Image (cartoon, rainbow, N blue to C red):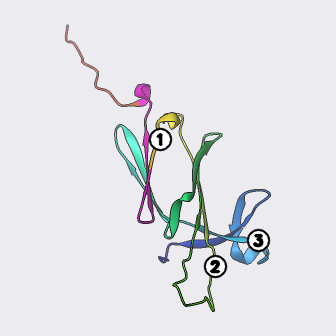
Amino acid sequence: MSKNTQVVQRDPQTSVAQSAAAKSFERRVTIVPVVDVFEGKEDITVVADLPGVSKDRLEVKVLDGNLVIEAEASVPTPDGLRLRHAEIQVPGYYRAFTLSPDFDTTRIEANLQHGVLTLHIPRREEARPRRIEVKAG
């Protein structure tokens, strides 16, 4: 984990993430993944670090104008060995963003490669910047 990674407790009934110190250890430990957001004229690109996550354990959804990333990592144990100690046995990831209505959420492209999720979210055609020709006289 990088120094920017946060560990939080998430209440599964309310889906609200709170600091680990504020909740008991009965709840599931959830990691808030480090995310980079790049903005271009035609879209934004969101890059999230999700080490140990496979495609079948990843859910990306848009709900009420929010982009939600939820995932669960697998911690493989090599053959012939058994796990004696793990800080987090099955880490879960959760991150949510509010999206502007300028973005076309029906055309989001998602790619997961080597534990890095890349999302391309295009702007709506009418929200893209365009040059307006000015005529003289």
Number of on-image labels: 3
What amino acid is at disc 3?
A: Arg
Magenta residues span 111-127
Query: Residue 91: horizontal and vertical position, in percent?
Result: 61, 72
Mark 1 or mark 2: whose residue is earlier in sequence: 2
Q: Dot 3, crowdedness within 10 Å: few (<14), some or many (≥20)? A: few
Per the image, the residue denoted by label 1 is 108
Query: Which residue in the protein does label 3 denote?
Result: 27
Tell me if residue 112 is in the magenta stretch.
yes
Q: Which residue is mark 2?
A: 89
> What's the amino acid at mark 1?
Ile
The quadrant in which the C terminus is found is top left
**In front of the other: label 1 or label 2?**
2
Measured as percent of width and height from the top left, residue 82 is found at 60, 89
In this rendering, would 88 be left or right of 41? Answer: right
- The secondary element bearing badge 1 is classed as loop
Q: Residue at x 56, y 76 (%)?
A: 75
